[in-house]
Every structure is written in C-alpha cells, then in structure tokens.
Amino acid sequence: MSGTALLEIKDFSVAFRQSGRETLAVDRISFNIKKGETVAVVGESGSGKSVTGLSVLRLLPTSASHPSGEVLFQGRDLLKLPEQEIRGVRGNDITMVFQEPMTSLNPLHPIGQQITEMLEVHRGMHGEAARKRVIELLKEVGIPNAEERLGSYPHQLSGGQRQRVMIALALANEPELFIADEPTTALDVTVQAQILKLLKELQGRLGMAMLFITHDLNIVRKIADRVCVMKQGKIVEQGPVEEIFKNPQHPYTKALLAAEPKIQPAPPQPDAPSMISANDLKVWYPIKRGLFKKTVGHIKAVDGVTLNIRRGETLGVVGESGSGKTTLGLALLRLISSEGPIVFLGKPIQGLKFKAMRPFRRDMQIVFQDPYGSLSPRMSITDIVSEGLRVHQPKMSPEERDERAAAALKDVGLDPATRHRYPHEFSGGQRQRIAVARAMVLEPTFVVLDEPTSALDMLVQSQIVDLLRDLQKKRELTYLFISHDLRVVAALASHVMVMKDGKIVEQGPAEKLFKAPVSDYTRALFAAAFSLETEQTS
C-alpha cells in the first residue's frame, strides 16, 4: 500500500505541552490516501481531526510535538523537511481550507489581491492573466458577480461566501492533495451541493487527492471513498464508506450514525406578548465609485423585512448564503445601522445610541457564526464567559462570577476545569459551545442564534439542540434561529422565514411550511436539503 499512496500517515501522534504538562491530542494513528482518492476523517469535536490535517502542513503551534510517527508525502517525510522546502509544498503541492475562513483571510486586503498573491508566489502569474484566473476561480466556486467582487474585503462577504473564497484560494494552483477542514460548514444546502459537485469535478480533472475533515455524515457518504472515524485522538474504525455505513463495528460509530436532533419544536404562542418586532426593516450598503466616491447604487442586504416574534417562540430563518439572514439578526439587536421601526419588549429601540441601548443588552444576546472571531484570543474562557456579568451585574463578587461561568460551561457540555485555558486551545466545535455559554450566562429573554450548531458533530449537535430546547422551556426564552441546516430548524422552530436577496420569500408556521411550501425557491431549497439526506440513507 505504501508504494501507491500519495500521503501515508504512520503510527502518528501529536502532543501539546502546557504549564509543564503534556496532553496527547492524536494517539498513534495510521492511514493513507492514494492519488485521486478521497478519505474522510469524521468524529466528535476535539477528537483530533483538525490537528491531524494541520500536522500534514506543519501548521501547529510551537507547543506541539510528535512523540511518534511519520507523515510521508510522495515518499518524503514532511515532518523532517527544512522550513524552506515545506513552504514550497504549502499552497502548491498541498493546500488546505480551514474551518473558520474569517480568521484565514487577511482583513486588510481585498479577496482578489489575496488570490492573486497565491498565483504570483507559486506560478509567477501577474497582471491581466492573474486577474482572469482569479475571476475564473471565483466563478467556479459560485461567487456571484465575480468581477465586481475582486475589490471586496472579507468582512463585506457572508460566512458562506468567505468559505468559497477560501476554496478558490486553495484550488488556485491545482494541488496534488487538497485538505478540506469543514469546507461546507457555513454553506446552505444548495451551495453545499454545488461545492461538493465542484470538488468532485476538479478531483476528476486534476487527479487530485482529498483529505476531507467533517462532522457531517451526510457529506461523508456523498464525497468520500474511505472513512476514518476518530474519537479522543484515536482512529476507532476505518474502511470503505459503504461498508462502514452499512455495518459499523465500533459503538461510537453506531452512535454517530444513529444521532439525529429530535423534532420537538417550540409550540406557537399566539396569545403571548410580542418579544420583538420590525416593520419594513432595511439595511442598504452604498456602492461608491470614482474619485469622489459617488454613490452609484446599493447592496440591499435586508430589503423591507417585517416580522413579529412572540415570547417563548422560535423563528427559524433559512436561505442561501448571502441572503441577509445574519444581517437581519444584527439589525434587530441594533449591532448595525438599519432603517425602519424595531420594538423590543414593547419599547421602540430604533435610533437609540450605545448608552441608551445598554440596559437592553442583558435581555438580548447573540451566538455568532464564527466563534473564533468572536472570542478574544487574549482572554481566558472564564473571563470571556463572565465578561457580561461584570458589565451587567457589577456587584457580583469574582468568586460568584467564576461559579456562574463554570455552571454555564457545564450546561453546554464542557469541562469547567478547562475554563482557565484560551480559545486557541479548543476545537472549532468546543469554541462554538463556549459562545453559547457566554450568551446564556446572563439569562437573557431573546437570543439570536447564528448557526450555533454548524461546527458540531451529529452527537453534540443533538445535545446542543436539546440544551437550547430545555433552556427555552425553563426560562421562556425567545429565539431567532439562523441556520442552513433544515433538520435543526425543523427540530426547534415554531415559525420559519425563508429569505432570498434580502427579502422574505415565504414565512409561516413551521409544520405547515415544511409540508407544503408555496414558492418555487422554498421548494428548491427543501428539495436540495432532503434529497441530500435521502441520498445518504437510500
């Protein structure tokens, strides 16, 4: 097998040293990838999946070491290559798409410039030739108006669009091995299907091998030839995808395949008082051109949205990437400027300045889509979770705040003993749970949940859905639940709103809308989601 493998990982371990103590994150794993083959690594958050991918390109921090093993690429041990040689491999022979695109893209440079840099460094491509190639790549990964987007900065793109830019970056030099760490996490089901199809087409054309790291079992069967199931740093089972899905041997694999969020949405509350409402809400961004930056048009991120969410209900907001879902949530919380009246707990809040909004902040919280970008790298987890308590409950003692932070972490399935660590020491899914804990510690009445389960494996996803449901019942919480995962929306939402291009396409009771969508767009969205799932279970 070693003679035909493009990448061979042998008896490989990764350990991290902190405060004089060593922790084993990857424990003597072995697998290989042939040219043109796709191997998926699947497992729970913190199982060592991403650490394994990062190890191939030697992108781990200096606190990491390798107590055992080899990482052989075309017969060369990457762990022993000089720094100059490994730089030649990165971005050229092996490329990687990271789980959190906002932290991978440079916020100071337009996306066109960042992709051009990759072409210049590795291919010596400049000028118009590089520009044409960049536009071609952006079109390939589904970025609309690709030519106009060359000058856009990462913060001007949606989470899904940023992820597609990362894929364009990774594929720019047609690599031998493509490492994809949750590349479709931030994408809606229609774009997810397009990206998976694109990757398969490129793989066929280029003979490219893929190491596909994911928590989504639906995607594993769609794209992979073989699968490795990881738990607590070990590969507990590996083999051909069909064989593992039909006849799993390890108890963890069986539990992972059986995991599914329970369909128990919050019941509609027609007699409950309104928690938050908006009328003809608009968020328009001016498009400025020319020497004097004259406004020549607008990007209508949210365009005339009217809604009303009652206490104890969950409004699920679905739609493709860039449809305005996240912008709507930020506008309702007064975190970005908007036009149109917003009423929260019976009080108009549109137009209120920062200080005037502060009394409302305890009651309205948000869990952001990108947990790494929203958690301060300089603060410990206990400081992050208890930060709101210091602001809104200043008389609370440090000991009480620490206790509340520990309890909040326990509620979301994290060991309170880890609360003195920093965000970079946790996996993507663990950071997502920290973000949920930070929002819930203040015991708010209204929470915007922006893709809170997107980075979680199926088992933990079900646990978080159950947790959100339990918290809602205990505290009569109201949720605005933004997601591209229709299974999770069906499990939680009492009402559903479908958005496209900043407008509401359709909305109504969740049960009715899922059974009989009216608009063609909603039907296409649901068909893409449920056909993907059907394909996995058929």
Image (cartoon, helix red, strand yellow):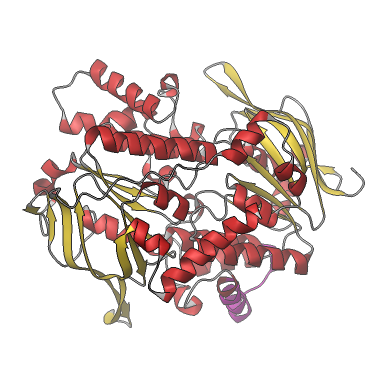
* Vertical position of residue 444 compared to residue 140: above or below: above
* Residue 254, quarter of the rendered image: top right
Residue 523 part of the magenta segment: no
Residue drawn where x is 79% and y is 63% of the image? 207
Indicate the position of residue 164 as horizontal and vertical percent values: 53, 63
Please state which of residues 80 and 155 is positioned toward the viewer in this rendering. Answer: 155
In the displayed structure image, the side of residue 435 where residue 227 appears, left or right: right
- Give the residue displayed 29% in from the left and 81% down from the top: 297
**Which quadrant of the rendered structure holds the N terminus?**
top right
The image position of residue 453, as x and y in percent, is 44, 44
| In the rendered image, the vertical position of residue 147 relative to residue 482, given as above or below | below
Q: Is residue 350 visible?
A: yes
Q: Is residue 80 left or right of residue 292?
A: right
- Image quarter where the C terminus lies is bottom right
> Is 128 a magenta residue?
yes
Look at the magenta stretch and give its main secondary structure. Answer: helix
Compared across the picture, whether 364 is left or right of 10 comes to left
What residue appears at the point 12 percent right and 63 percent down from the top-left corner?
341
Counting from the top left corner in percent of width and height, residue 491 is at 41, 47
The image shows residue 519, relative to residue 457, as above or below, that is: below
Count of numbered circles on the image: 0
- Which residues are drawn in magenta? 122-137
Q: Nearer the viewer, residue 308 or 426?
A: 308
Residue 212 is situated, as x and y percent measured from the top left of the image, at 66, 50
| Residue 380 showing in the rendered view | no
At horizontal 45% and vertical 42% (from top left) the residue drawn is: 262
Report the residue that reaches farthest toward the right: 3
Which residue is more in the foreground, 278 or 513? 513
